Amino acid sequence: MQIPDETLDRILLHVSKPARYVGHEWNSITKDWSSLTATIALAYPDLYELGMSNLGLALLYDAVNRQPTYAAERVYAPWPDMEAALRAQGLPLYSLETHHALADFDVLGFTLQCELTYTNVLNILDLGGVPVLADQRGSDAPLVIAGGSCTYNPEPMVPFIDAFALGEGEELIVEIMDAVARAREAAASRCELLRALAAIPGVYVPSLYTPIYGSAGELKGLRAQSDAPEKITKRILAQLPPALTQPVVPHLQATHDRAALEIQRGCSRGCRCCQAGIIYRPIRERPVDETLQAIDDLIAHTGYDEVGLVSLSSSDHSGIATIVSETLARHSDDGVGVSLPSLRIDSFSVELARMISSRRKSGFTFAPEAGSQRLRNVINKGVTEEDLLRTAQAAFEHGWNHIKLYFMIGLPTETDTDVAEIARLAHDLARLGRELRGRRIEIAISVSTFVPKPHTPFQWEPLIAYPDLIRRQRLLRDALRGKTFKLSCSDWNATWLEALIARGDRRLGGVIYRAWQLGARFDAWSEGLNVALWEQALQEDSAAPDDADWHPRRDAELHRRRAREEWLPWRHIDVGVSPDFLWAEYERALRGELSPDCRDNCHSCGITLTFAAEREAVAADAWGCP
Amino acid sequence: MYTEAVQRLRFTFGVDGALRYLSVLDMGRLWERLLRRAALPLVFSQGFNPHPRLAFGAPLPVGYASTMDLIDIYLGAPVASDKALARARSNSPAGLSITAVEEVDLRAPALQAVMRSADYEVHFWSDATPDQVQRAIDRVLGCTTLPFTRERAGHVAAFDLRPLILGAVYLGREQEHRLRVSMVCNPQGAGRPEDLVAALALPVTHWAVCRTALHWEGDGEA
């Protein structure tokens, strides 16, 4: 059903920020459904303002809509007031473009970027009129797929998702739409469609796999049905696709309210705590000329006053100085500024930040991640104390009175002494700033709690124990009093929940389902997370008679070190980097040995072996690999 | 980047569809982006985060449509008004219709400072008979004071609604009841037609408002 405007008018006057739910933004694409062979609703399981800041989904929207017979539309998670209004009126959740109920689409595609949005996925399905559980979907229900960084451990979401799309989706999503259109044309059964999808490289159809559990309930393996691949390898593009220059311009102020341009995919730094650094390999740079043209087109097509140059480490792009200075020069008349979301710690980055600030004043942020040199070596953050001080000195000398630092607590091998070094470093920087600026400076210190993520050298590590975390957070609070420091630490409940889901197996799906039934929504929001619902869901799950020999045993699971030979729940997912490399890096971490930037010397992570054919298809220097 | 204005253009525009749900701030951003796409030589404020200089005639409440809204744009280089109109129109999103442009004296006062009143067409859905509606209107217009309490987003405001109502005419019933309303809209405050509907004390299920005219000192209507 298409929801008539008059019907919506009756509820939109009574919800907060109704512009989230109306669509028809500049550059949005509305197609006539009568001429289409397949439709997809792309769903971001959080608010519009956040979803509209996500570049990945914008790329997929563009990729599908370039195909004349396919349409991609958008939907976001409704805030509780809108959910209540929809339920009260008996209205389904609908797409922004044509206001079709989600159940009307051939495909529903979720991006999973954060484990704490999973209950919103279930809620979107339910509100859209789609059975929440995959095994209850009939032949007329949409195919439900998911992609994004969290799908590198897809297992906890298996009960709800028909097929996962692993890796870079620009080509893959079109191949999936092709399969769906063919199945629609041939009136194929759902089962036939799923088998066709499983034959596409990068697609994981979980219903074709059966987990094997040991006598103590431990996961021992995954049995693939005969024709399903044992290992599913992520997809990559051999080179960066043409830049997206006509993105939808949101009605509301988005979280990142600027034009976004991807200048590089992948990162060569090899920080051992960072999942993105592994899963987005290999490194591919956008050439300078192409980048400059794309920036001009983006500004002309959107009217934004700022362009964000997106990558995992913006100052690592070989032509970044040219890109920034040339962009500022070309746009001196129209007030367009540049932002770089991720700068490394060196004086070159200060120079870049200074150039950018000539147009638009912003804070100066850097991420030492750990306070002590020992611990920075463990995580392979190739930054010395001298680098830190020199960078801060340059920032102060160029006029910044306010800097922001990112750290983590709970890193492997960490002791209280390492954490005390965070405070010591902050005091040193404050003193330096006072000397150079002749006034009190402000240092914002954001301390998150480290969650060991799948496909990283630390995937075998436990989550920090609660008493250790609390003691170390308190240690920092005590050491960083006064007006100079603004300390923020992440919430334990959000951390353990994220860790539990991120590293869980298929059985965790039952807990997610129950938590959603109990009312869990927007768990990533401090005002949304109601941890009591999760506690109850976990408790009920562990008491379920059919599962008596296993339950997520929250504490035991969270704080358990995995053995090398253990079957990790994501073992069948291949990100192109070999587990042997990850283990070797883990051992080097424990010995405190650095692995320098891999642009200069290859550490044989396996990415060029996995994607040898892709690499052969492009110029020898197209990738950052030596 | 221009910082001195040499020209001031006044666009008349209407708002409908999805754009009714934008806040005043959202509408400001929409115009900034539209004008940037139109490549007009905007004048920027000075400071750390420069913004183009533009000013609305009267903020349109969220949820209202409009057939007459006004915005003044300041330009750093002269542009022929028909050319500015064409460029702005071709960069307007669905729901925004620019109907006219005129050049205004740079020294003329800000529109918001001289705004006086606004006319609205109000539709509301109710089981009340036309007679009942007419009697309710007569009762409201016959009052000398009309104490009113409005609650919006957790804020409660108590005020006299009567002096904000300049006129109300019942147009009859199609599927819904229709009124033409004129209300105060000046720098001290603006009457809201939905408050007038509430003051009628009829069983109303929902309403829709469209602003049809703005009146200001020196608008040539005397």
Image: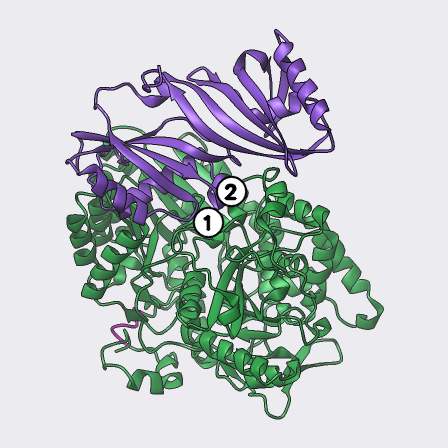
Q: Main secondary structure of the magenta part?
A: loop
Q: Residue at x 42, y 61 (%)?
A: A58
Q: Which tag, 2 or 1, sits closer to the chain's start?
A: 1
Left or right of A355? Residue A56 is: right
- On the question of residue A259 being in view, the answer is yes
Instruction: Report the chain holding disc 1.
Output: A
Q: Which residue is mark 1?
A: A419
Q: Nearer the viewer, residue A472 or A400?
A: A400
Amino acid type, label 1:
Val
Q: Are marks 2 and 1 on the same chain?
A: yes
Closer to us: A24 or A399? A24
The location of residue B47, given as percent across then percent down, is 24, 31
Q: Quadrant of residue A222?
A: bottom right
Residue A45 located within the stretch drawn in magenta = no
Q: Relative to residue A434, is residue A424 drawn left or right?
A: right
* Residue contact at pointers 2 and 1, CB within 8 angstroms: yes
Vertical arrangement, residue A335 with respect to residue B193, above or below: below
Quadrant including the N terminus of chain A: bottom right
State which region is magenta. A596-601
Q: Quadrant location of residue A265?
A: bottom left
Which amino acid type is marked by label 2?
Leu
Q: Colour of chain B?
A: purple
Q: Please provide percent x and percent y for residue A16.
A: 57, 39
Q: CA distance from mark 2 to mark 1?
A: 8 Å
Vertical arrangement, residue A124 with respect to residue A188, above or below: above
**Image quadrant where residue B27 sits:** top left
Q: Colour of chain A?
A: green
Q: Which residue is mark 2?
A: A475
Say which chain tag 2 marks.
A
Q: Kindly identify the residue that appears in the image at 70 percent across and 49 percent down.
A: A87
Residue extending furthest toward the top: B144
